[in-house]
Image (cartoon, rainbow, N blue to C red):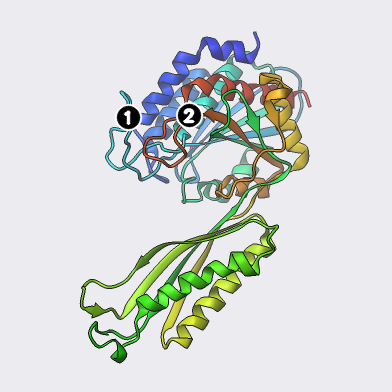
Amino acid sequence: MKPLEYFNQHHAEIAEWRQNLHRRPGLLFDVAETADFVADKLREFGVDEVIDNVGQTGVVGILRGAAGTVNHAIGLRADMDALPITEATSLPYQSEIDGKMHACGHDGHTSMLLGAAKYLAQTRNFSGTVVLIFQPAEEGGVGAKAMLDDGLMERFGIGEVYGLHNRPGMPVGTFASRHGELMASGDNFTIEITGKGAHAARPHLGVDPVLVASHIHTALQSIVSRVADPISSLVVSVTQIHGGDAYNVIPQTAKMCGTVRSLDQALRAQAEAQLHSIAQGIASGMGATVEIDYQTIVPVTANTPEFAEIAMAAAANVVGVANTTLDGPLNMGGEDFSFMLQARPGAHIFLGQGDTAGLHHPEYDFNDEIIPYGCAYWATLAEQRGRA
């Protein structure tokens, strides 16, 4: 039986796992309930080894093939954590935990890899070793790096690694990726502005940090429009400005926060330097001071071209070449799977979610219709690499 046939037959069971996970979301590393569910399922399936608490709350499953003695291990990664969003779906399985929901589909990613694990544990139609990686804290906690720091690649002998994410707006039953750069780096910044407080009726006696923040905000937009090469991709977004507590008081301080996204390391460094220069220069010229905290969070997600071809060949085996592309759209979102791709060759791939609410939206729900395709992709990839 081909993998897709198997998963069509077991679709309802895997969808039930997904909906159970959806009810009980956890944030960042606080995913013990999900991790326990994963570990229990892997042991139930007869996975050879199940290791808990990798990278704090990650789970790793080891499957050894029966078809030959190819001496290599491939890593297949799914993320487990949810988002601090209040769900607005009214689904029968909606989140039972206030202020937390699976608004990015990690419940689906986890369930699809579990489905593949069950199939592979039964069939063993591959050589070498498959390492099933269930990662916490993708949503801003760099859980991938935590697992790497805990020796993920070395402990389990992983030679190549693959990731998958659902993509709203792409048709169901389609896959997309790219050679090389796929998703942007993600950096965060906080600019603390100190001026001089005063009565709002006597602004000439103070230095208004809110006005300074407004000028900095406007000037930061010139990084994209006048510093970056127009052909390059760069985003600089100020997402928060905080200052003051009263109608009639010019505050002493103000704070602004935001993010920088880029697909090029040199441009990323240039944007950081320019942000510092603009903020410091404007503040100084207006009589204020600034303190800048610039945090480089995740690097560019860049596929190894050869392994992007390997991943797409597995996808094409499931859905046909016409439903796959290696000329998929670039994405300015960040993904901490980028750390794993820096550690080992591999590829990240998108699976069409259909016409649904977007990622990180309170009305988003993972489309259970795509479960057989994701499971079959993972199983086929394991079987094809086992024969490499």
166 is higher (above) or lower (below) than 42: below
310 is higher (above) or lower (below) than 245: above
Q: Are marks 1 and 2 in contact (CB under 8 Å)?
A: no
Q: Name which residue type carries label 2.
A: Gly
Closer to the camera, 56 or 119?
119
134 is higher (above) or lower (below) than 376: below
Between marks 1 and 2, how big is the CA–CA gap?
14 Å
Residue ID at (39%, 29%): 21
Residue furthest to the bottom in view is 205
x, y (%) of residue 147? 54, 46
Residue ID at (44%, 35%): 357
Q: Quadrant of residue 33?
A: top left
234 is higher (above) or lower (below) than 202: above
* Residue neighbourhood size for the residue with mark 1, other residues' Cα within 10 Å, grouped as few (<14), some (14–19), many (≥20): many
* Residue neighbourhood size for the residue with mark 2, other residues' Cα within 10 Å, grouped as few (<14), some (14–19), many (≥20): many
Which mark is on residue 276?
none
Secondary structure under badge 1?
A: loop
In which quadrant of the rendered image does the C terminus lie?
top right
Secondary structure under badge 2?
A: helix
Q: Which residue is mark 1?
A: 94
Residue ID at (36%, 39%): 362
Q: Which residue is mark 2?
A: 108
x, y (%) of residue 257? 43, 65
x, y (%) of residue 164? 59, 34
Image-based side of 69 in relation to 370, left or right: right
Q: Name which residue type carries label 1.
A: Gln
Image-based side of 21 in relation to 169, left or right: left
Closer to the camera, 127 or 267?
267
In which quadrant of the rendered image does the N terminus lie?
top right
Image-based side of 318 in relation to 88, left or right: right
Q: Earlier in the sequence, mark 1 or mark 2?
A: 1
